[in-house]
Image (cartoon, coloured by chain):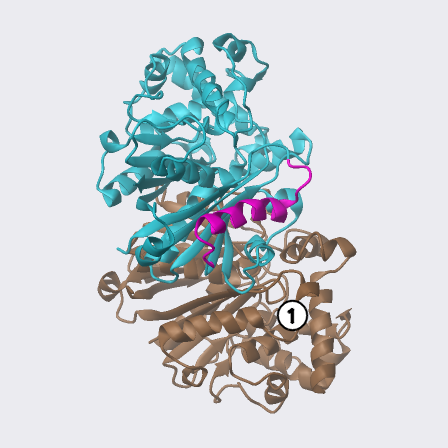
Chain colours: A brown, B cyan
Amino acid sequence: MRKVFVVGVGLTKIGRHFDKDLRSLFAEAALHAIDDAGGVKPQAVVVGNMLSSSLYQQDNLGALLADYIGLRGVAAFKVEAACGSGGFAVATGYSLVASRLYDVVLVGGVEKMCDYPTATVAAALAQAADAEYEVVYGASFPALNALAMKLYMETYGVSREEMAEWPVRMHEYASQNPYAQLRFRITLEDVLKAPMVAEPITLLDSAPIGDGAATLVLASEEVARKLSDTPVEIAGVGMGSDSVDTTTRFDLLDPLSVRLAAEEAYRRAKVEPKDIDLVEVHDAFTITGILSLEGLGFAKRGEAAKLVAEGAFAKGDKPEANLSGGLKARGHPVGATGIYQVAEITMQLRGEFPGVKASSPEVGLAQTTGGVLASTSVIILRR
Amino acid sequence: MRKVFVVGVGLTKIGRHFDKDLRSLFAEAALHAIDDAGGVKPQAVVVGNMLSSSLYQQDNLGALLADYIGLRGVAAFKVEAACGSGGFAVATGYSLVASRLYDVVLVGGVEKMCDYPTATVAAALAQAADAEYEVVYGASFPALNALAMKLYMETYGVSREEMAEWPVRMHEYASQNPYAQLRFRITLEDVLKAPMVAEPITLLDSAPIGDGAATLVLASEEVARKLSDTPVEIAGVGMGSDSVDTTTRFDLLDPLSVRLAAEEAYRRAKVEPKDIDLVEVHDAFTITGILSLEGLGFAKRGEAAKLVAEGAFAKGDKPEANLSGGLKARGHPVGATGIYQVAEITMQLRGEFPGVKASSPEVGLAQTTGGVLASTSVIILRR
């Protein structure tokens, strides 16, 4: 298998970018990544995006964005797996290089979610669920995750207070991340007293709506060695799925798609969970992050929330989780999120992350998902 | 580069499938392809689709469809490049096998367009154009192609009668293709007297709106030899782009994205245009097919329409073009179209195509595009 490296990263701060449209927000991140990769010209552009069609009536985003950043002519298309689109775009970009189709590929995610009223965005996000068997009955995306959270707490005897530790920690980390959307600290009491979104999920259990773009330049080993003194290897890629419709799950608390994607990625990278120093998990809601930690093999079933409440996975532990602030507080511009994660871990492995620094990372893992853990990708990175 | 083969194909007839939803239409084709591939279990599903988000409020289609056909758990995601989505899905599936990520990948396209009024579908299809710089000014997708057709006819002195030969021929072929949507013959006069859609494009210059699904099973050489007596090699893949916004084209009559995609595919397959026996080009409108023939190197600039009018590219010539009936008459369920093309050429190379048979094909080429020739993929297949 041909080796693939990350040789450039570019991020925008996540927030309300009312002054930029999709293409200009994307360009800000993409031109930075190309610059970071020594000005190399990518031969292909893979775009991760979920909402351009439903919110902006724009398809064909691959060619549109490639042209806008000066790459008219290159291979270009969009990859979509709902909120997990970014991670699948990274996996696709990886395969374009590993297959020898291209030597240099730009993978970029972009999402604008703040131009519309929240109800409009919520309806668009509900497209991650099953339109015919869930949404038609009135299920919102937070409501579906609330079912999982409630079942988790009841099944494993986890208290609301224990579940609240995660978002408190995420806000602490995000307060130090210049790219993060919610750069303020919160307390356990804040989480418990926050407005209820879908019982037991409160506002502070939920990732915010935000605009952002993140891009990577991927390259073959030969090119990477020329372009960068600090190339970071994509050591393993894995992808998995589950039913989109949660009512047909075999077991709502078994993060099947995460387990399968992780198994693939670990096998290909020839590592185990214990070898991972640093992880970014997909905590769109507190429960999503908790189930993801279990699916990745960092905790047994039903134990992750209690471990988090006891201080596990914090700065100094192994692995250190979501030092970026996670989807919860760094933010979650859906189709870009998986690319933010890989960019953050790349910066950590280079020793260049501008927020809370990982202790001494050698191997990092990014996990992102679409739907209620329905479409998951896992990317393992190595210094 | 690891070799990749088509070992199974499955198609639905294109038409009005009011009795099937997206998933059941997809399943009809997918289960047929898996059966055709000896019942092998694909490890990944790549879906080509454009309109599920805008017409059915459904994202996350990869996981949803994989689950529905009994493949819960596998890697699954969607690839989108407007009407060219299917071809890019094939290229992506190819790279997943060529990279050694997977040995067996199902690539499937599905589209349902007949459930809604034509105006709704036309608005969704306009998402292939630039929402901010074209559509907002009232440009419909046929109108943009009409500009190219008019410019082509004026620049090269091509008559309306000469341009009308193509759709007549497509209907003749489609009348013999059991999967085709428009199985009736038309005359040159029919084309000229058909209702005007956007001058000079008439209704019979335009691909119809239709529902359909097409799937392929791709496999590595080792697996292919076990599964099939007649594996067809994907000998080369190419992708190219152009500006989506036609007003910023360098030259509206230069099919840049087609040229670049073709150059890549020819180089990788180590063939030239003269080596191609059989081609399926993307004739969403007559002009699109004509410009595509030129971009692929089968005719010089400005000559394809006249050559067609003189009988070139018909059954018995080299290459033989669109024996399926093309988008014009076989039909154009947009995200599935590129997969129909590859399936048809595969069946031709196997000697199993149920319509007009190619003379003695060894090498075939499928070209599909999104937007006004903005996102093009070229797939070269070899017996």
Quadrant of the image for the N terminus of chain B?
bottom left
Q: Quadrant of the C terminus of chain B?
A: top left
Q: Which residue is mark 1?
A: A250
Q: Within 10 angstroms of label 1, few (less than 14), some, or many (20 or more) residues?
A: few
| Res. A185 in view | no
- Residue at image position (62%, 43%) is B54
Residue at screen point 66% across, 53% down: A124
* Residue A307 falls within the magenta-colored stretch: no
What's the amino acid at mark 1?
A: Phe
Q: What span is in magenta? A: B17-41
Looking at the picture, tell me which residue is in the foreground, A118 or A302.
A302
Where residue A293 appears, as percent x and y from the top left, is 55, 79
- Vertical relation: B10 (above or below) A103: above
Asked whether, in this view, residue A126 is left or right of residue B285, the answer is: right
Residue A138 seen by the camera: yes
- Whether B361 is drawn above or below B240: the answer is above
Q: Main secondary structure of the magenta part?
A: helix
Nearer to the camera, B212 or A13: B212
